[in-house]
Image: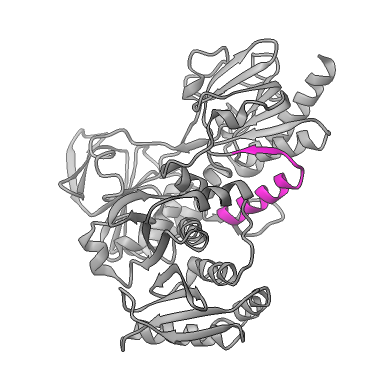
Amino acid sequence: MALDPEIKTQLAQYLELMEGDVVLKVCAGSDAVSRDMLALIDEIAGMSAKITVEKAELSRTPSFSVNRPGEDTGVVFAGIPLGHEFTSLVLAILQVSGRPPKVEQQVIDQIKALRGQYHFETYVSLSCHVCPDVVQALNLMSILNPGVTHTMIDGAVFKQEVESKDIMAVPSVFLNGEFFESGRMTLEDILAKLGSAPDASEFANKEPFDVLVVGGGPAGASAAIYAARKGIRTGIVTERFGGQVNDTLGIENFISVPYTEGPKFVASLQEHVKSYGIDVMTQQRVKRLEKKELVELELENGAVLKSKTVILALGARWRNLGVPGEAEFKNKGVAYCPHCDGPLFAGKHVAVIGGGNSGIEAAIDLAGIAGHVTVLEFMPELKADSVLQQRLFSLPNVTVLTNVQTKEITGTDKVNGITYVERDSGETKHIELQGVFVQIGLVPNTEWLEGTAVERNRFGEILVDSRGATNVPGVFAAGDCTNQPYKQIIISMGSGATAALSAFDYLIRN
């Protein structure tokens, strides 16, 4: 196996950053995957005098571990970490060599403070753009804490394990042999789930902010940057930085950037925010907003933050169908990310619910993996852009059903079919299939505002004027959580800037 010349050039630059020696311990058989894995490892080892290769006995074949000389780190790759996971391999080599991770010291201290034995296993697909975040977080924990180990497992290589554990969504993480969590998790998410998260005391002595942004997506990041540029005290409080964009693969409509991917885009946002010294508080959910002399925000951990102005950039999440079987079979055939979970349905029959751009893009992607794709759209016509529809209808293994209403997702231990009603005839029909991908738009993350003075419409969207102001003085809103008609990254960022400038104007006038 030979690396692409461009990738090899980039890799050579990264390997120059190694600070110490690394030993790759390899467990290989005579199969094709083992041969390809050995070829990759030999190629990488040949690029740096600091990398040596040894044979070893590991629990899976083929696999290899990344270690320091005379010290096992617990970092193991089962399969060949290419595709999106190649970055995970490069980072593991650099961090094991002694290269400091780009992580806050507080988080490093949390990792090192963990007591006990934590043996993690993460099942991934190499096409999953969400998986590397989880793999890299758990690898880092293994490197920093001797009580933690982590193995990345390519589900396509270890199919029997995937089937025996009924894994139908990636990443799927197991801890000490038991299911731990599925889906995107940050390092902070994992630590919080292990019981290591900031408590109220860490927020007790914070001075009031001039501008406090709730939400760390494109709108929130933009708002915080524009506020900080005015030289005023700015903070962001968010559950996860990046929001919904973390779950977006290809971004092709951000003007001046022909193509990027969600996680890369979020990383750039984060670096930009950090460069302004903004107080970023992650892993925090707000449960109460009250306008007093200052605007008060109460967090779920009991802490209360105060600010002269607040910008609500709460974002939105995938809308659920709300039909029987959806919740019961989530990650057991019901999925929301075709890029992540699509490879698990190779050769199978799947359905895509939703005929908008997201739904049709999902159907097109899945058609290249699945045996057959059935698209179900509630309206009489698809809503996706014509260029996407043309591409969809050119595919031989796609069926499109319009003017139908999904009634139930059926199954036993996992999905086995979908029941729908033809809206014109009222006839109920059933399709046997193995997976359902839900792509029916977004719902704003504004439920917690129920009972506050902030006005919302019947869709739950916050009502704002042309300046991003809500009906509550000093409270502004931006992005997908508002009643702005178009939910696009570039529009959200613009509205975030508008809200920040309006908040600054408010501070000057009050």
Q: Quadrant of residue 208?
A: top right
Q: Quadrant of the C terminus?
A: top right
Here the colouring is one colour
User: x, y percentage for residue 401?
Assistant: 30, 46
Report whether 372 appears left or right of 296. Answer: left
| Residue 264 lies in the magenta-colored region | yes
Compared to residue 346, the image places residue 387 above or below, namely above
Judge whether residue 492 can be spotted in this image.
no
Q: Quadrant of residue 478?
A: top right
Compared to residue 107, the image places residue 40 above or below, namely below
| Residue 290 lies in the magenta-colored region | no
Compared to residue 334, the image places residue 505 above or below, namely above
**Residue visible at 32% across and 38% down?**
403
**Residue visible at 45% across and 44% down?**
356
**Residue visible at 38% across and 87% down?**
35
Report whether 278 appears left or right of 435. Answer: right
User: x, y percentage for residue 364?
Assistant: 41, 58
**Residue visible at 33% across and 55% down?**
174
User: x, y percentage for residue 113?
Assistant: 50, 49
Judge whether residue 488 can be spotted in this image.
yes
Compared to residue 171, the image places residue 225 above or below, namely above
Q: How many marks?
A: 0
Report the magenta stretch's main SS: helix
Q: Nearer the viewer, residue 377 or 158?
A: 158
Q: Nearer the viewer, residue 373 or 128?
A: 128
- Magenta residues span 261-281
Q: Seen from this angle, which residue lies furthest left?
A: 412
Report whether 247 appears left or right of 258. Answer: left
User: x, y percentage for residue 22?
Assistant: 55, 78
Q: Nearer the viewer, residue 304 or 432?
A: 304
